[in-house]
Image: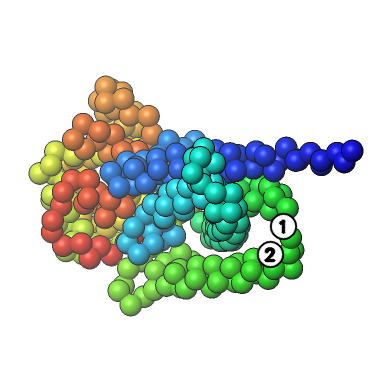
């Protein structure tokens, strides 16, 4: 009597596990996409003086072809979910022949493998950017990279691959194509994080104070406003927006630098609220009543937007329709 070899547990459960991980990826990237498109800020806790998730999503690497990077991640995870679970759905149909089911399983395994390789290579590049270019901490980004690596591991171990050489060859081709495409997409970003100089746009780097702030105004604003910055500042007054700041807050100064000296003077005179108790302009009770927990914070249409906001984001949130050739971004 010949005993049939038992199927390894990982072969039985690899597809459901890949589907479950893809589902977590959908929740992760779906949340980030929603927050980005609605102008919100994702919940993200990081150590003091360390860039967080909002900084990453607002950086040049956070947008591809004018759309949030998280949106493309969402589409990728949805594709992986469908590829992982499709054969399981076919198994429940009595009319499906074993031959057709086998073909579907083989085809989807290959697409799962190639997709997982592409996502892992792209995630590895983003982890490099996160660590060495942005020097930021984004838990959502790290989670997404772990999801991609987990799916790749399960795809490789989740079945008996007959031709290992073909896996290596195809995997290498996909990895090279993914890396070349990624470098091409981000080719316009310089090493310092600025976008190419053709349009004159400059990135505001993380502010590291070298002197004590003045309790009346903080640090001197060194950037110069353009017409778009001044127009947006006037628009924010009309929308009854409020900005809550503390003179000693480096991130508040970064927000000021985005507007430039002339435009931020308009903000300061009309809608900025100083929250530091030791400032001559301080209104700490007003800030407590507004439930402000961090600086800077914007309240627009009754909603709190925490952290430094790029002017493009403020324009989108408030329905600004004027000039948008903003000179600075973060």
Residue position for label 2 = 167
Residue 128 showing in the rendered view:
no
Decide which of 281, 259 is in the foreground and name it.
259
Q: Is residue 34 visible?
A: yes
Disc 1 to disc 2: CB gap under 8 Å: yes
Which residue corresponds to the image point at 59% horizontal and 59% vertical from the top-left? 110
What label sits on residue 278 in the rendered view?
none
Position of residue 260 measured from the top left corner of the image (x, y, whole percent): 27, 58
Quick check: 204 left or right of 192? Answer: left
Residue at left offset 38%, top offset 34%:
294
Residue at image position (36%, 75%) is 197
Tag 1 residue: 161
Mark 2 burial class by Cα count in 10 Å: few <14, some 14-19, many 20+: some
CA separation in Å, label 1 and label 2: 8 Å
Q: Quadrant of the N terminus?
A: top right
Above or below, 253 against 288 in this view is below
């Amino acid at each position: 009597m010949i005993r049939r070899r038992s199927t390894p547990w990982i072969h039985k459960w690899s597809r459901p596990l890949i589907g479950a991980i893809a589902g977590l990826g959908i929740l992760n990237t779906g949340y980030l996409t929603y927050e980005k498109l609605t102008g919100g800020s994702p919940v993200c806790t990081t150590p003091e003086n360390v860039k967080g998730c909002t900084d990453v999503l607002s950086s040049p690497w956070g947008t591809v072809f004018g759309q949030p990077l998280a949106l493309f991640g969402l589409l990728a995870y949805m594709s992986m979910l469908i590829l992982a679970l499709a054969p399981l759905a076919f198994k429940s149909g009595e009319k499906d022949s074993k031959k057709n089911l086998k073909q579907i399983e083989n085809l989807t395994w290959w697409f799962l493998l190639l997709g997982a390789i592409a996502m892992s290579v792209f995630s590895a590049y983003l982890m490099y950017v996160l660590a060495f270019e942005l020097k930021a901490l984004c838990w959502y980004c790290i989670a997404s990279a772990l999801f991609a690596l987990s799916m790749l591991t399960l795809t490789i171990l989740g079945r008996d691959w007959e031709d290992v050489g073909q896996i290596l060859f195809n995997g290498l081709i996909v990895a090279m194509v993914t890396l070349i495409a990624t470098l091409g997409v981000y080719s316009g970003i310089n090493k310092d994080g600025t976008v190419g100089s053709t349009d004159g746009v400059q990135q505001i780097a993380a502010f590291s104070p070298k002197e004590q702030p003045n309790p009346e105004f903080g640090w001197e604003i060194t950037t110069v406003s353009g017409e778009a910055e001044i127009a947006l500042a006037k628009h924010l007054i009309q929308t009854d927006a409020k900005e809550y700041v503390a003179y000693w807050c480096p991130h508040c100064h970064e927000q000021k630098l985005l507007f430039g000296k002339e435009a931020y003077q308009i903000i300061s005179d009309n809608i900025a609220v100083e929250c530091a108790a030791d400032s001559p302009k301080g209104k700490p009770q007003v800030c407590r009543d507004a439930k402000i927990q961090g600086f800077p914070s914007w309240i627009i249409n009754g909603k709190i937007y925490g952290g430094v906001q790029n002017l493009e984001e403020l324009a989108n949130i408030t329905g600004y329709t004027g000039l948008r050739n903003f000179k600075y971004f973060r």
